[in-house]
Image (cartoon, rainbow, N blue to C red):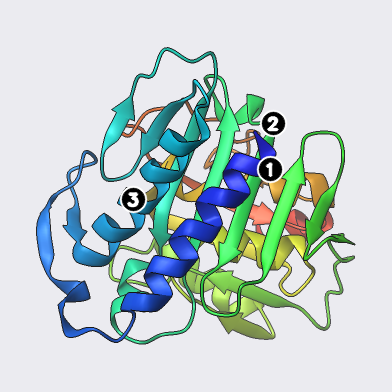
Amino acid sequence: MKKLLRDIAENIAIVVNENIGNPGIGKTIRNGADGTPTKMIDEIAEKAALAAVKASGEKVNILSEEAGFINNGGGKTIVLDPVDGTFNAVHHIPFYAVSIAVGTKTLSDVEYGVVRNLVNNDMFEAEKGKGAFLNNKRIKTKNFDEKNHTFSVYLGRKASAKSYEISRQARRVRSMGCASLDLCMVANGSTDLYYQMGYPIRITDIAAGVLILREAGGEVYGENKEILDMGFNLKERKNFVAVGDRKCLEVIL
């Protein structure tokens, strides 16, 4: 199964890189299974993913942002966002990725995840109970330093009022619009916190990134400070805060 997820990431990386810069990739093709517009780049990437699964012969279900749930009669399900950060990809902002995870029914039972940066090909991976890795090197979150910290905070028009309060507490703030990579940045110690409140996220965006962060030593919490969990479906959306060091929560909550 690990090989299949890597093959999916490779297939998507090839077709996305072939098409980036083409004027038509931002065209809306249809509405995806989640109800949001499917851009041409999403469609191209998803087709490459489905082709990889078919070629593998693996009996595995697929939950994808565009196609929805594909029941192949498997005991496990691949949770896929073919292009996380579609807006970035279409508008030449170099921060977008493919997010792929495999599990059974919920975020908590995801057993393996891959987030591949489609700009520089960095590969984040994690297997449950076996740690997190960036390009085959183990990664860990960093200890929280109250005097020198960096937060990633969603600051769009739907952002919660608390988001702006959180931003003012940070020495530095970043907001790049790709949930899977934002989670990986916390896992890698590049940032201390990822605060996503006001614009709830689907499981397809975060299934792999949450596992990677947890295996690196961090944690992800819901609005009520509970450990985040979500079912394998496209209807559920959740706000959350991801931290590398739990001491960070004492500052923001």
Question: Looking at the image, which residue is at 54% across and 20% down?
Answer: 76
The earlier-in-sequence mark between 2 and 1 is: 2
Q: Nearer the viewer, residue 15 or 214?
A: 15
Q: Earlier in the sequence, mark 3 or mark 1?
A: 3
Q: Which residue is label 3 attached to? A: 46
Q: Give percent across and percent down for residue 36.
A: 19, 51
Q: Residue 111, which numbered label?
A: 2
Q: Quadrant of residue 193?
A: bottom right
Label 2 neighbourhood size at 10 Å, few (<14), some (14-19), many (20+)? some
Lateral position of residue 198 relative to residue 242, left or right: left
Q: Which-is-in-front pick, marks 3 and 1?
A: 3
Q: Is residue 1 above or below residue 74?
A: below
Residue 209 in view: no
Mark 3 or 2: the one toward you: 3
Three-letter code for the amino acid on which mark 2 is drawn: Glu
Mark 3 vs mark 2, CA separation in Å:
22 Å
Q: Position of residue 172 (x, y in %)?
A: 65, 85
Per the model, the C-alpha gap separating discs 2 and 1 is: 8 Å
Residue count near mark 3 (Cα–Cα under 10 Å), binned few <14, some 14–19, many ≥20:
many
Marks 2 and 1: CB-CB under 8 Å? yes
Please tell me which residue is depicted at 59% across the width and 81% down the height of the picture: 173
Distance from the alpha carbon under mark 3 to that under mark 1: 22 Å
